[in-house]
Amino acid sequence: MKRNWWKWLLGVVVLIGISWPAYTWSRANIRTMKNAGRTRMAPVIMVPGSSASQNRFDSLIKELGKETPQKHSVLKLTVATDGSIKYSGSIRRNDYEPFIVVGFENNKDGKANIDKQAVWLNTAFKDLVKTYRFNHFRALGHSNGGLIWTLFLERYLKESPKVSIDRFMTIASPYNMESTSTTPSTDMYKELYKYREGLPNSLTMYSIAGTENYTSDGTVPYNSVNAGKYIFQNQIKHFTEITVTGANTTHSDLPQNKQIVALIRQYLLEENVPNKIRKQNQRRLQNQ
Amino acid sequence: MVGRFMQRLQRFDTAVAQQRYFRTIRDTLTLLFPFVLVGAYINVLNQALFQKNGFLNRIYYLSHWVPGFKYMAQYTGMLSIGVNDIIAVIAAFAVANFVVRATNRDNLMAGLTAAVSFVMLNVNFAIFNDQGDNTSSKFLEGNLGSQGIFLAVLVGVITGWLFSKLAFKPHEHQLLETRTHLLMRAKNNLLPMVITLGLFSAIGFGVSFISQMGLNGLFYTAFKLPFGKISHIMITIFLATLLSNFFWLIGIIGPIGFSGNGSVTTVQNLAYALQHGSAWGAPNPITLHTVFDAFANVGGAGMTLALVIAILWKSRNQDFRLVAKMSWFPTLFNFNQPLLVGLPILYSPLLAIPFLLAPMASMLITWIALKLSWMPPVAYPIYRTMPGFLTGWLGTGGDWHALVISILNLVVSTAIYLPFILINNRLTTGEVTSDEA
């Protein structure tokens, strides 16, 4: 035992040498976290179309993951009809641009359902803001998901006054439902048009249409997507409509279509994309 | 009763140790030990010292005053990639080598074949996509590190078996190799070599259609399945930890491991604690994070810091003492890989029992303390490299009760490990020959 006393002493010194700075650091850390108040986080929130679950964007996220330099973590929410929320997945620490997919237990088509889904989106959105304390975000909607987002932006975003939207992209969203008419007149369109003044003025928005023939992408008529411009014109800062046609432009293939993935990277995520993709995207814009 | 059980366990452990493939695996692990040990010290440097979230960096603010911090981070990162991230390739080589040596066939050839076969299972098929840019790697490096040990052992055993069966002529070691003899070796081993490579390349190719991350990725997806939904109910957390620690024992390192600060419940806890100025009454007191990460992971999975204490205190097995003396430092920062392969804990029936029991006991104590509201849950961020016995204290924002619970957990875990160390003492003093052949 005699020869061991200095080992014990050394141990105690090391223990204190670690514990005390650790304690002071942890107090200081908690203080800075409290004062910082907000995170650098700006999530990308995605809403799938009707009859699609919270897993709708898996292949798109995989496509994006292959290309993008930073890995995005994925959080999925399912909102039940009573407004309760189920979470799956998680947001990695230090991931400032996570993907959040909001799905609905009742994901049926039709105006009445879309109205409800916009309310549920608001419930989920408020919960997300409360938990992750971000104050700006990007939004992506496929098909009816774009309509849900539009309604949300028009009517409910005001309820989170501190939060603003950076960019908004819809993929094949039927602003005039299934109607092929060039003069939009469905109830859904009328509602979106009625509340259009609620849209945030500073919004930059892209509406992507897919076509596999003269009139539609197989599900959504081109004219219905095109009707979106009447809602957004004169209300927001930038509105751009892009038509994608080529391989894999069937309605349900659109989110993982390579061209659209490239458009998402450049316009929604504002990534520093390689010149090759930039040129390809520009050519498409010029050909409009 | 207990005495009889202990005796039986002792005999079982000896019997297993004499089993051929088991012995081979244990020999391999011991051979890996120096590499893993160096790797663990590198990990301490890289992850605890020179990384933003490293514990020592955080508490001593190293990045503010150490010159060239960024370069040191890169350099130690390089060391870590170079040593830790290819450990499984070495394991595949060593297992096949030891299996074949026992049957008197060409062990060097078998080892090399196993290493190549293992790498073949981990080719990144994404590079064959026409979209693939040049930045993605040709191999799935993630599978070549300690995560791949289980698969590497499997590949090594199969390769070794194939060589033992298919190489007809026994191998003669020569002190001076001649060209003729080397060519003879090539001729004698061509059949098993081609068959082994053919087998594993076919498997690797087949798997690439199912899984982007190779066979190992498939394994991990399968082994992660039971952990998809870990609710707040204590029993599921218990079972998940038990299963996860069992996977550790067979070389599948950490399907759930350290769950980190990212999950929704944890963020909610943090938000609550920041708003209210204390962790008391946080919305999710019992989660994998608050119970397992913070209190049952002291020194890494299996409460291995307790094992180090038990060995240094009571063990008379010189091998154990040597390994423990060399490994206690990384274990402080929760890197227990040297112990896993050095003692070894992996594939050891004797140490498996306390390895599974100690975290269970710790979680039970923690759970009771939380249920009785004797301490607040861990709500503030904790880091992987935080010394385990301080995590509870720091994660609750410096609550002394949590520190007491952590120390209690450590004491109880040491008590759980101790009887098994005593059995091992009897093994080493009683029958030296059978253990150390």
Image (cartoon, coloured by chain):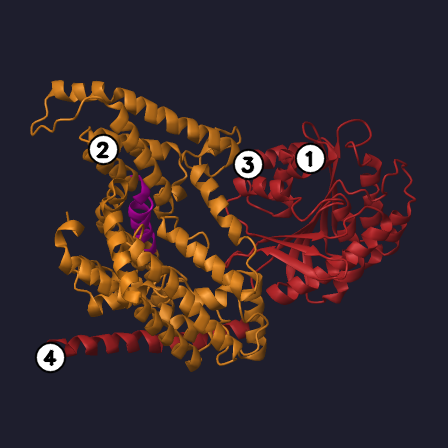
Chain colours: A red, B orange
Q: Nearer the viewer, mark 1 or mark 4?
A: 4
| Mark 2, residue position | B100
Q: Which residue is located at x 61 percent, y 48 percent?
A: A269
- Under mark 2, the amino acid is Val
Residue B86 occupies which quadrant of the picture? Answer: top left
- Under mark 3, the amino acid is Asn
Q: Which mark is residue A275?
A: 3
Q: CA distance from mark 4 to mark 3?
A: 72 Å
> Which of B364/B61 is in front?
B364
Q: Which residue is located at x 52 percent, y 53 percent?
A: B227
Q: Position of residue B68 (x, y in %)?
A: 31, 58
Q: Nearer the viewer, mark 4 or mark 3?
A: 4
Q: Is residue B145 above or below residue B264?
A: above
User: Under tag 2, what secondary structure?
Assistant: helix
Q: CA distance from mark 2 to mark 1?
A: 53 Å
Q: Are marks 1 and 4 on the same chain?
A: yes
Q: Position of residue B104 (x, y in %)?
A: 17, 30
Q: Which mark is residue A253?
A: 1
Left or right of residue A12: residue B122: right
In the rendered structure, the residue with mark 4 lies on which chain? Answer: A
Q: Are marks 4 and 3 on the same chain?
A: yes
In the rendered structure, the residue with mark 2 lies on which chain? Answer: B
